[in-house]
Image (cartoon, coloured by chain):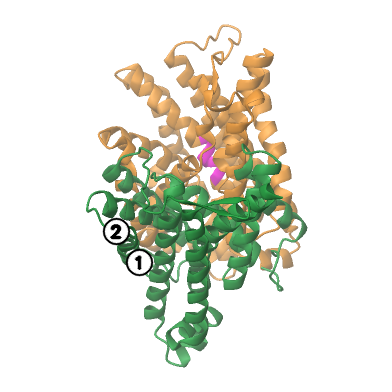
Chain colours: A green, B orange
Amino acid sequence: MDLFLQQVLNGLTLGGIYSLVALGLTLVYGILHVPNFAHGAFYMAGAFVSFHLMKVWGLNYWIAMLGSALCVAMLATLAERLVFNPLRNASGLHPMIAAIGVLLFLEASAQAIWGADFQRMQTPYTGIIELGGVTAPVQRLLIIAGAFSLMVALQLFLKKTVTGSTIVAMAQNRDGASLVGIDANRVTMLTFAISGMLAAVAATLYAPINLVYPAMGNLVITKAFVIIILGGMGSVPGAIAGGLIIGFAESFGAFYLSTDYKDIIAFGLLVFILSVRPQGLFTKGSN
Amino acid sequence: MNFLLGKPGWALLFALGLAFPFIARNDYHLTVMSTAYIFALATVGLNLITGYTGQFNLAHSGFMAVGAYTVGILTVDHHVPFWIAFALSGVTAAMLGFFVGIVSLRLKGHYFSIFTLCVGYIMFLVIEKWESLTHGTVGIIGIPAPSPIGPLVFESPRTLYYLVFFFLVLGVWVMHRIVNSLLGRTFMAIRNSDDLAESLGINLMRNKLLAFMLSVFYAGMAGGLYAGFVRFLGPGIAGVENTFDMTMYMLVGGLGTLLGPLLGSLSVPWLTQYLQFLQEYRFIVFGPILVLLVIFLPHGIVGTYMGWRMRRHPQAQAGAAAAPVAAAQTQPEAGRA
């Protein structure tokens, strides 16, 4: 039973991180209908900026997280202005390839600046808490608390504020949103900034129990794609539910099946689900 | 310039390819060129599904790895003669492509790309983790060189160069026949509008699946050649970076043209050679180039040139320009370049 609860804890940790990354991806997809392959590079950049701020500038963990969120938000907005905005009328293939260009550029830049080595990020929270027989590292609890409060905050922002509603409106109907006077450019930039911010926070939360290296975003982003396909591209609740499904599948799969193949589980699940239901798990219409 | 188009241009390219070993100053240049040919063959295949049929397959390097590992595993662990293993490399990739295709081709557009991205990852992870079959991260060492055919012995870089060159020429010629046949036009019709194609009575699934299998057959063959040429294999060949490389080659030259992928996959590696101090960091330069190309030159070098020529000589196309046939008419033209 204790082992089972331990897996639940791991599943929540992984699921929280995956959901945050997938949320950024799904928001951008909702607005631009572009699968942003560069999102994993934003995630990686977030981890490296936090790492740099803490190690070289000696900043506090939370301030580093804030700084990295702002940096990556700026980076994402810049990418939108320079790359995706000129391509907004291009065919489906071209923005995808441009996103790959951004991804390759950011990855090579990170490697040039920080080297290809695996780095370890320090965290001030190294303690372990005993909860009814389950040992829980504080950092993991922090990830769960941080990820889920951010999700709630995002949901409130999208539902309760006018700025948030403009994003939802744009995702629902671009022309309709323009007709009621929503500035498409501003909303797109805002969406990219939010998605970058979410990626940076997720990376900073997760990095202390993982490693920091230039290719760290690749696996995470691929899983985030699996998640938003499961949850329906552009759907916010779908991204959260999908993130948790993949998180739990992985933590239980690693424990009960095989640690070696745990990364395949997410993709295997996707292949299986799409073979049975090509339209995704939660979507009603066809794609 | 016009005399370079069509048959004389191809003959010139062919002659250059034949003469290259006598121009090249050292074996290193031959090796670079042969490697470029192998990736060119795979890129020509990728172009069939992406450029001509409009489905962006991100698992292409996975299929190349399947071909390469077919040769590697059969020759090293089971002592199968090289040529039999090589013949099987394309077939294995195409067989696997059949099963991947029937699942993935039901999806459209972005969904297809993301799905194949995941399939590519599965292939990479399986190759890395299934140690009893693939030797895991250690890789397969000591793959035999292609065995002699009669008097032809493939030991020196020069003979290997001609071997690879032969398969590239064969591959491009077959591709030329495919894209200029009714089948090729069917693929292009699917790319231009699959709804319209379906309403014309084209069986979407069957044709897409055929394009996909042909495309990964090329990848498998290229992989088999790679195994025989490099004679060492690691899981890295299945990495998605290789697909990204091939996408770049295809895009630099021009999507959906026959010459484009060739031009891209032969010129970019040479450019990398001259930017050798960059090596690991080459994408700091190539990343932005890729973005700029997509924004300003979305049809690549060959595609842009074809468009420019068509505007210069509209009378050549005038007969075909009236009807909706125009779209179908200009495409094979682009394909022939």
> Which amino acid is tagged 2?
Asn
Q: Is residue A62 magenta?
A: no
| Magenta-tinted stretch | B41-46
Question: Among all residues in the image, which is located at the extreme bottom?
Answer: A180
- Whether residue B305 is visible here, answered yes or no, is no
The answer for which chain carries disc 1 is: A
- In front of the other: A52 or A267: A52
Residues marked 1 and 2 touching at CB (< 8 Å): no
Secondary structure mostly taken by the magenta-highlighted segment of the chain: helix
x and y percentages locating residue A219 in the rendered image:
52, 48
The answer for which chain carries disc 2 is: A
x and y percentages locating residue A220 in the rendered image:
51, 52
Q: Relative to residue A253, is residue B128 drawn left or right?
A: left
SS at circle 2:
loop
Q: Which mark is residue A60?
A: 2
State which quarter of the image contains the C terminus of chain A. bottom right
Q: Which residue has dot 1 on it? A: A73
